[in-house]
Amino acid sequence: MKTKQFFAVSAFLAVGVAFAQANDIAKYDPRMALETAVVDTNGVKWIDGRYLPLEGKCYADTDEFYDRLPKNVTTNVNGGVRSMKHHSTGLQFRFRTDSKKLTFNWVPRNADLAMDHMPATGKSGIDVYRQEANGTWRYVKTGRITNPAGGSLTIPWKPGDACLVNLPLYNGIKSFTLGIGKNDKVEALGPRKSGIDKPVVFYGTSITHGGCASRPGLAFPSIVGRDLDVPIVNLGFSGSGKMEFEMSEHLAAIDASCYVLDCIWNMNVQMVKERFEPFIRNLRKRRPGVPIIMAERCDVYGDGRYEGFDIVLKGIYVKLKNEGWENLVYLPHDGMFAPDGEGTVDGCHPNDWGMMFMAKAYGAAVRQALGLVK
């Protein structure tokens, strides 16, 4: 019965949707940006975010523009994913502008701006970075938000500098606008120096989702993207990364440079036994040769209490390697959390300090998978 269901889901997805590739979504269209821009009485030209260079959005057929998954996610996938696909974690604008001042206005999708263990700056705010001459992205400022009606941030800017804007982690976006000088322009950035222009796709749990970074740019997948100079897609879903077979189809629809599977926190050992192997086999079948990283469950306490998960996961890895699988990287939990015990907000979810350790561990695995020279 389960096998028939899997095939039905696969057929539905393959036939029902013309999948879009990550690099083909939300490309900057200068003509549309100019035609739709509005110049106000103060001489500020407002550009709708839908016409700015956006990364992290991989599907054209979505319920709402800033969604992370397509409309056709079925009830074979848990309700958490179907709800949190509206969260904008991992989405980022990357552009260059000759404006001397930038203003960002955004309206969040949900009125709940913060959580008891995650501030509004991370859940619902935005982050702005500037690229230095050596290619390093340097933090500039966070767009704070206190009113569900919307947030606003205005900053001075050096004309010609590249700009990166991270969108909210645990909220969605109803609307986003960029304000620049009325005679100024925005242009998309060129190819990355890393040579990697297809995204690294992270699929996982609340930690991958960004919980509980104090601001969007400090979610570990975003740190990895900046550090390695690679595009990323964040498909983390809090409490809901359960590796339903259909999700392997949605991941495979993305023309990725690498896939990172980090769902162990949201599964019990039996689920790992039943779901991981069919999931990864379908992903490899649909995207042959694309590197896949299998991540262990991060051991917050360092006492080996998750050994049962590790045994099962490592067994699957060894089985696949013995079958001759290449481009398969195993990421142990060692080094994922701060050794001083100060890396979480609640004994589970990383704070900013913890996110740095997560980024270091995952960054090393992604670097290995992509063959990037350090």
Image (spheres, helix red, strand yellow):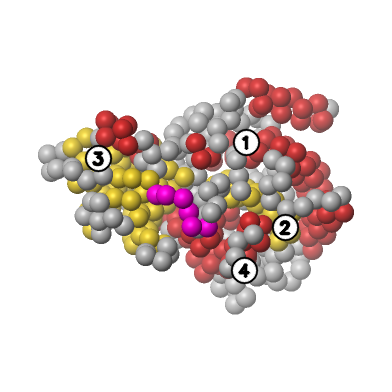
Residues under numbered marks 2 and 1 in contact, where contact means CB atoms less than 8 Å apart = no
Determine which residue is flagged by label 1.
253
State the extent of the magenta-drawn residues as a range: 189-194
- Looking at the image, residue 342 sits to the left or right of residue 265; the answer is left
Question: Does the magenta segment cover residue 320?
Answer: no
Sequence-first disc among 2 and 1: 1
Sequence-first disc among 4 and 1: 1
- Looking at the image, residue 336 sits to the left or right of residue 226; the answer is right
The image position of residue 99, as x and y in percent, is 23, 51
Which labelled disc corresponds to residue 337? Answer: 4
Residues under numbered marks 4 and 1 in contact, where contact means CB atoms less than 8 Å apart = no
Determine which residue is flagged by label 3.
46
Determine which residue is flagged by label 2.
329
Which quadrant of the rendered structure holds the C terminus?
bottom right
Q: For the residues marked 3 and 4, what is the alpha-carbon distance in whole angstroms? A: 42 Å
Q: For the residues marked 1 and 3, what is the alpha-carbon distance in whole angstroms? A: 33 Å
- Which residue is located at x 66 percent, y 27 percent? 13
Amino acid type at image mark 1:
Ala
- Which residue is located at x 65 percent, y 49 percent? 259
Amino acid type at image mark 4:
Phe
Which quadrant of the rendered structure holds the N terminus?
top right
